[in-house]
Amino acid sequence: MNKMLFLFFLLFFFPAAALVIMTPMDSDKQYVFGFINIAFILVLGRFNGRKTLIIMIMLSLLMSTRYIYWRATTTLHFNSNLECFLGIGLFMAEIYSWVILLLGYLQTSWPLERSIAPLPADMTTWPTVDVYIPTYNESLDVVRDTVLAAQSMDYPADKMNIYILDDGNRGEVGEFAAAAGAGYITRSDNRHAKAGNLNHAMEKTRGELICVFDCDHVATRIFLQATVGSFLLDARLALIQTPHHFYSPDPFERNLSAATQVPNEGALFYGPVQQGNDNWNATFFCGSCAVIRRSALDEIDGFAVETVTEDAHTALKLQRRGWNSAFLAIPMAAGLATERLALHVNQRIRWARGMTQIFRIDNPLFGRGLTWQQRLCYLNAMLHFQYGLPRVVFLTAPLVFLLFNLNIIASSASLIFAYALPHLMMSIYVNSRITGRYRYSFWGEIYETVMAFHLIFPTLLSLISPKLGKFNVTDKGDLLDKNYFDGNTVRPLIIVTLFLALSMIWVAVRLGLDDYPGIDPRVILFNLAWAGYSVLVLLASIAVAKESRQIRKTIRIIVQVPALAHFTDGTSLATHTADLSMGGARLVIPAGSDIAGKQVAEIELTFQQDAIRLPARGVGNTGADLRLEFAAISLNHRRQLVRVVLTRADAWVSEPCAPDRPLRSLGGIVRCVYELFFGRRLFSGAGPRRPRIAGQKGSTQ
């Protein structure tokens, strides 16, 4: 009966939708029609519920499709070959955005909120697990804590083996592995980079499940107990992926004050996108913080080696063979974000190149084994990384009119506004409703603009010749000893900004000289407004290049743990931590405590069943807090410290961000521009700070 009702609905919906999309209107009628739809969707937005959201999505798609149909049938008339080339280019960029909007709605509208599948009480039935920690040239300081955290996972010792996969063949890493009691696997070459390293380890180990952590990702103690149970419930489950959480700030968070009050750049993917993928059995493997069934990998001859994104390609191969995948949206491991903008750009280039390679050599639209929903989820991911050229087109399109008087949209300004405004406003509002706790309005444009020019050449080259390019390791754990401006990374953005600003000044001068005879002033206003918005986005993106120094050797984590400070005179102070790191701690000094002139000898930390006593020395006393630095500690003490600081079950769980408010979000973009020029924070105390675990600067603890 439900299928019959659904078919009747489709028979009614498609003719009605076609009528809405194709009916021509003059600007006045279109304004009325558009504002009625905007008002209606704003009213719907006051109600919660999946059905209401689906109606909002359908209305948004109708207005966006109506805009695209109007552009295709009315505005593609040009007076010269150059106008035709540029106008078609702009229209193709709009088609790309419409496709991404459609696929994004499909991918994020039905998120699956999966819960933990508990393990059976009989531990003898639990599968054996090999934990792989691949490394190449990363510092031992980075690798060490990842290994110690993995050893702290609550899982039977006879069913879990930890292996460091050292593609760098470094003696110091081998010595640490021996001292820590971890397995150590090397190979004679680096063929196929990370994927080859993992495949080589598979030949040397025998665990039923394989758990992979990048060498900077520290796991909480519950990681395996929270993930392995799903494999016992579903014999065809090949993969369970968990979020990549970062306990150090990325370049956006470190260099833009407004970015500390919005969701992290990766929150959208590791939230609605992966949960939506999970609903369609299309979860992506992300290379770390995941567990995979060995027998499934054996069926596809191990991790994929054909592309530089071995993770997503491996998941695609598994799903083609009919294996299931899952995403558990609980952060149970955390790593280091890229410290510098240039490194961030290089990492994204590799991702874009790899997804483009998959698109060429193993296109999800073709071949057997995938459902149509899986195909579209993968298609969206691959098309997403082609945003470089469309983003540049949108940023620079106003220059065509401002500098050369060329008309690449054959329509009046009034009609453009009448059709474009409902399309833009409704898509912004609906996306805000769907993903507003994970990606605030307008911030996606900042993230994409920073990357746009850098992605064009690698993605086009990979489309032409997918075998070109190599895997590059993203450096982690570096320090910045001074502030500086990374002009090289944002040079294309600076050039475009200058052109836009100068063209706007030129137009203002020509207006003053009455040098636009016969041209509708609203056309000039439309292009000036477009150029002004482009300049705003470009300047906010350029502001990310103001690199802030990072001189902490270890990242400070905001956490309250009971503490006891022992002084050299034999007295003690009972208190708690304000924050902790692997190098030191900041203790709250209780009111009325008199510790003036006292020297700290040791600190005792207690968390649940864990207690650790470490030598420490004071490095600062503000009267309200006492800053301590740990002395050199043994490997066993460091393992205990890792358990207290990094592997607590709730270590990376925080409250979700507040819902998106588009106008406030736009205000945050304006703040970024202000701080670019004036170097100080505007309204630094405004708005609730996003609850997160952040690094603090200004100390070498």
Image (cartoon, rainbow, N blue to C red):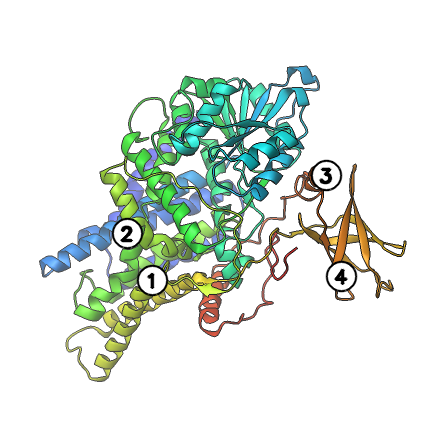
Contact flag, marks 3 and 1 (Cβ < 8 Å): no
Identify the disc placed on residue 389: 2
Contact flag, marks 1 and 2 (Cβ < 8 Å): no
Query: Mark 3 packing: few (<14 Cα in 10 Å), some, or many (20+)?
Result: some
Badge 4 is on which residue?
625
Amino acid type at mark 1: Arg
**Residue 508, placed above or below residue 364:** below
Q: Earlier in the sequence, mark 3 or mark 2?
A: 2
Q: Is 500 on the left-hand or right-hand side of 324?
A: left
- Nearer mark to the viewer, of 3 and 4: 3
Badge 1 is on which residue?
491
Badge 3 is on which residue?
640
Separation of marks 4 and 2 at Cα, in angstroms: 51 Å
Query: Residue at position x 48%, y 27% from top?
Result: 325
Amino acid type at mark 3: Gln
Residue 115 visible in image: no
Quarter of the image containing the N terminus?
top left
Q: Earlier in the sequence, mark 3 or mark 1?
A: 1
User: Is disc 2 placed on a helix, strand or loop?
Assistant: helix
